[in-house]
Image (cartoon, rainbow, N blue to C red):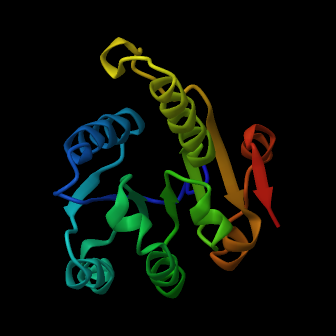
Amino acid sequence: MLTPAAARYGALIDPRNPISEQMAGKAREAAEFIGKPIEVISVGDDAALDAVFLDLPRSRIDALLFSPGPFFFNRRDQVIQLTASYGVPAAYWLREFPQAGGLMSYGSSLAEMVRQVGLYTGRILNGAKPADLPVARATKFELVISGRAAKALGLTIPETLLATADEVIQ
């Protein structure tokens, strides 16, 4: 675990994203499994995003998890800057976050998703009926950690986590 001292977690979700409730449920299950409380926080606009960070001292959240979706992805520079400014570790779903300075990500590959879209588009353009194509699911997941962000947050990355990471950004 990268944040063993964390006593309370926060999961930020975009209430307009249809997968947010599923993600919130999975976050609650994971928190229960490790025996730590988690607060699920709906963030649907920039004011609510800023308010989460202003409220960190009162909420006593020690680490954050950001749900997938365009709201947080389109604000990744702002989100990364806020987490760094407030000194709170955060996990994301795409490698683009640690590449831009965030701490870590675990999720499917955006490049692989785009490749799958291209393959399906090609099949459809070659006459396949969309309804006849199987539903594609992500099969490749990657763990990306930013050593630079960990150092800035005063975190030591356990060797076991480094060994399992697909990429460590120094």
Q: State the image quarter where residue 9 is shown.
A: bottom left
Residue 84: % across, % down: 54, 81
In the rendered view, tell whether residue 2 sits above or below residue 119.
below
Residue located at (67% from left, 72% from top):
149
Q: Quarter of the image for the C terminus: give it.
A: bottom right
Vertically, is 90 above or below 54? above
Picture quadrant where residue 143 is located: top right
Residue plotted at (73% across, 43% down): 165
20 left or right, relative to 133: left
Is residue 152 rendered to the left or right of residue 75?
right
Q: Would residue 62 be seen by someone viewing this image from the given angle?
A: no
Residue 137, placed above or below residue 106: above
Is the residue 16 above or below the residue 86 in the image?
above
- The image quadrant that residue 114 belongs to is top right
Residue at x 28%, y 41% (from the top left corner): 28
Residue 168 in the image, given as x and y percentages of width and height: 78, 55
* 59 displayed left or right of 124: left
